[in-house]
Image: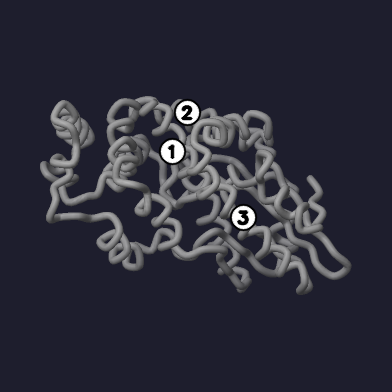
Amino acid sequence: MLSSLYRVVRRLAAAATAVALVAASPAAAEPALWTIRDHDSTIYLFGTVHVLRPGTEWRSAKVAKAMADSRELTIEVLDADNVAAAQPLIARLGLDPQRPLSGKLPEPDRPRLAAAAKAMGLPEGALEPMRPWLAALTLAVTPMIQAGYDPKSGVETVLTAEAKAAGKPITALETLEQQLRFFADMPNDVEVDLLRATLDDVADGPAQLDRMVTAWAAGDLVNLEKEFVEETRRDYPHMYATVVVGRNEDWARQLKAKLEGSGVSFVAVGAGHLVGPDSVQAQLEKLGVRVTSQ
């Protein structure tokens, strides 16, 4: 159960947060793209992954044209890699220095925590001030960074740089604090379970993420739904309702409002939000907005 929980949260992180990591995509990439239109507006809806290996090819001709034709870019959160902005949020939501991390774990897990930190080259005691959710993400992310994955190569980072260079406005659907709170607001026992499961499964992370990005880059929506949605929806309905369905409903309302304006815009969100029965597209259809696959 703990291993399954970790996979669920890691998948949700891959779809929802800027700390998610994925591996290199196939050479002939064709990720899925959708459009929303009315008489004077076009919104391109693109599913992304947030961090990639440098040199990963993911941009297809239709994605490049859609971005070039758009007058503005909308992403999940602005300045996701802004360390100065993130530090006070991490300190408030992710640190608990008065209660050391190891004391929150069952006794048998404490040596495993120390061993995992040492294996990753983290300084002794570096994890102790962290809450379990932040320690879990740190232990999941660190091997990916050490393996050469670079946040600067992520899709949103690349698109944001292009939009800035072209003088296009950039807006966001959420704030960084909202995204971090999906972890920080978890019940205490779920936080601890997440950390324990991370200690069990962290070595399997790259292979799982390889499968996700392979499906994404190929536009394989069936396998993308399998990797991102199915297990979460079946086994963790409360988490699925909060982290996936609730956000998709909110984003759909925002996109419908955007459609009431005019012009062409490009919206890029985590790919996991654009597959499955409760996807952003499904929520838009409920609001009477037609979505077309490109």
Question: Residue 67's spot in the image, x, y percent?
Answer: 69, 58
Question: Residue 63's spot in the image, x, y percent?
Answer: 70, 50
Residues at circles 2 and 1 in contact by the CB criterion of under 8 Å: yes
Q: In this view, does 267 lie to the left or right of 111?
A: right
Crowdedness near tag 2: few (<14), some (14–19) or many (≥20) residues, C-alpha within 10 Å: some
Residue at numbered disc 3 = 268
Say which residue appears at 63% left-offset and 56% top-offset. Answer: 249
Closer to the camera in the image, 248 or 34: 248
Residue at numbered disc 1 = 10
Question: Residue 160's spot in the image, x, y percent?
Answer: 55, 62
Question: Residue 152's spot in the image, x, y percent?
Answer: 44, 52
Q: In this view, does 242 lie to the left or right of 96?
A: right
Say which residue appears at 79% left-offset and 51% top-offset. Answer: 291
Crowdedness near tag 1: few (<14), some (14–19) or many (≥20) residues, C-alpha within 10 Å: many
Say which residue appears at 78% left-offset and 73% top-offset. Answer: 262
Residue at numbered disc 2 = 208
> 167 above or below 244?
below
Residues at circles 2 and 3 in contact by the CB criterion of under 8 Å: no
Type of the residue with mark 1: Arg
Crowdedness near tag 3: few (<14), some (14–19) or many (≥20) residues, C-alpha within 10 Å: many
